[in-house]
Amino acid sequence: MSEASGERPRVEIWTDGGCKPNPGPGGWGALLVCRGQEKELLGGDPETTNNRMELTAAAEALEALKRPCIVTLHTDSEYLRNGITRWHTGWVRRKWRNAAGDPVANMDLWQRILEAAKPHEIDWLWVKGHSGDENNERVDQLATRGREEL
């Protein structure tokens, strides 16, 4: 996922995660596409939640980038998109407490994503799940494989 020139590579990322049942065994999947090259990532956790798998997929995808990139990250998780584009600034300001004053759920993964995102310029796009987006369907299958291969 690199380019020969000094310009930042443009990378398209699709991520997904899920559990069956929730909570329970879960999997995550990610697809990275740069200049026609593709990289698939997947993994799982024997005891987790849908939200943790969604966040793990994004963290793993961003951590796989070897240099600063211009990224478009596609997710069907409103939790991920809202957390990273709207809620996290308040959490940080409140020392990782939510609006009710409780500790932020999945703080470890939110912090991991924020750290992994630092070198990149990222556009976080929400896509409707199971609506015909070929790459969203593909990462859904990767997430299922990640869970099944535990």
Image (cartoon, rainbow, N blue to C red):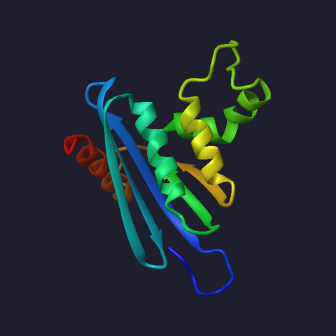
Please say if 36 is above or below 110.
below
Q: Is residue 26 above or below residue 131?
A: above
In the rendered image, the residue lying farthest to the right is: 93
**Along the line of sight, which residue is nearer the eye, 80 or 62?**
62
Q: How many marks?
A: 0
**Residue with the most extreme left position:** 148
In this picture, residue 90 sits left or right of residue 35: right
Looking at the rendering, which quadrant does residue 97 occupy? top right
Residue 149, x across and y down, in percent: 20, 45
Relative image position of residue 130 (x, y in whole percent):
33, 45
Quadrant of image for the C terminus? top left
Measuring 63% from the left and 55% from the top, which residue is drawn there? Answer: 123
**Residue 71, image quadrant:** bottom right
Q: Residue at x 41, y 76 (%)?
A: 37
Res. 76 visible in picture:
no
Residue 72, given in percent of the width and then of the height, sits at 57, 60
Up/down of 79 relative to 128, above or below: above
Residue 44 sits above or below residue 29 on the image: above
Q: Is residue 37 left or right of residue 86?
A: left
The answer, for residue 51, to whether it is visible in the render is yes
Which quadrant would residue 82 be assigned to in this image? top right
Please name the residue shown 63% across and 18% down the image. Answer: 103
- Which x, y percent locates residue 1? 50, 73
